[in-house]
Amino acid sequence: MTTQQSSTTADIAQQVAAIWAEVLGPGSDRPGATFVELNGQSIAAVRIVAKVEEQLGITLDVGDLFEDPDLETLTRGILASAEG
């Protein structure tokens, strides 16, 4: 898993939040709301994975979203991937 070196932690977190909101729509910023609770389905998972890879250069597995993360948990995982 790789990331563009110019991205800071805050930049990455902001981009992940924007992708999450764009794909999952209104109400997706509700604290603690998980992917499945927000009616996330396979097409939404594929879109999130594609956008994260396109915008951040970080490769996720679609299955990661079906482990039912909330935005904060997903962001922590992406940040860990970016650092490591």
Image (tube, rainbow, N blue to C red):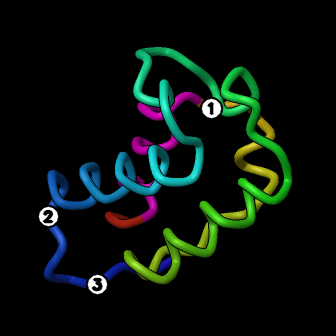
Magenta stretch holds residue 76: yes
Q: CA distance from mark 3 to mark 2?
A: 9 Å
Marker count (numbered): 3
Taken as a whole, is the magenta stretch helix, strand or loop? helix
As measured in the structure, the alpha-carbon distance from the residue carrying label 1 to the one carrying label 2 is 22 Å
Quote the CA–CA distance across marks 1 and 3: 24 Å
- Which range of residues does the magenta coloring cover? 70-81
Query: Could you tell me which secondary element the residue under label 1 belongs to?
Result: loop
Residue 30, image x, y percentages: 44, 18
CB within 8 Å, label 3 to label 2? no
Of the numbered discs in the image, which one, if any, rests on residue 4? 3
The residue closer to the viewer here, 74 or 18, is 18
Q: Amino acid at mark 3?
A: Gln
The structure residue drawn at horizontal position 28% and vertical position 84%, both measured from the top left corner, is 4
Locate residue 47, reporting x and y percent. 66, 66
Residue hosting label 2: 8
The quarter of the displayed image where residue 33 is located: top right
